[in-house]
Amino acid sequence: MKWFLYAIALIWIGSGAWMILYSHKSRKVFKQLVKNLDRRILCTLPAVTGILLLLSAPWSRQSWLIRLFGILAVLKGGFIFWNPNNLYDKIADWYLTSVSDQTYRFFGIITLILGTVILSWII
């Protein structure tokens, strides 16, 4: 499962850099992804990612953090699936339309840092 940690770290590094450098284009792509895919199909991506993170946690120096990311991803998948009080749609609309470019780039910086951290902790 070490391969999954490498893959998720590189995906997070790449997407974080993409969000920082091309914030307008990346926002358009994420908006199309969220709007065109059914919410029930979209919820499987974080849930499966979370399960794979939980399974690959022993191959990390800080396995507690990888497990925490996995648990949060599974919870996110459940949140997207059940969508209490239409809250997911409100959050997605806020993130994709109302957030300023600086805030969007800040989320890209956080994603880039987390990907680098995971990459540096792989045994």
Image (tube, helix red, strand yellow):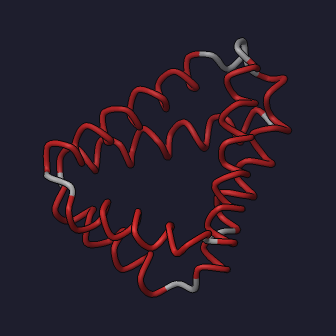
What residue is drawn where x is 52% and y is 75%?
86
What residue is drawn where x is 66% and y is 79%?
41
Q: Position of residue 43 (x, y in %)?
A: 65, 69
What residue is drawn where x is 47% and y is 25%?
116
Q: Position of residue 122 (x, y in %)?
A: 67, 20
**Direction from residue 49 to residue 116 in the image, left or right:** left
Instruction: Say above or below: 64 vs 34.
Output: above
Q: Position of residue 44 (x, y in %)?
A: 70, 68
- The image quarter in which residue 14 lies: top left
**Direction from residue 119 to residue 113 in the image, left or right:** left
**Direction from residue 88 to residue 71 in the image, left or right:** right
Q: Position of residue 31 (x, y in %)?
A: 33, 74
Depth check: 1 or 16 in front?
Answer: 16
Q: Quadrant of the C terminus?
A: top right
- In the displayed orientation, state which residue is furthest to the top: 61
Q: Quadrant of the N terminus?
A: top right
**Direction from residue 87 to residue 39 in the image, left or right:** right
Instruction: Say above or below: 92 vs 60.
Output: below
Depth check: 53 or 103 in front?
Answer: 103
> How many dots with numbers?
0
- The image quarter in which residue 66 lies: top right
What residue is drawn where x is 45% and y is 73%?
89
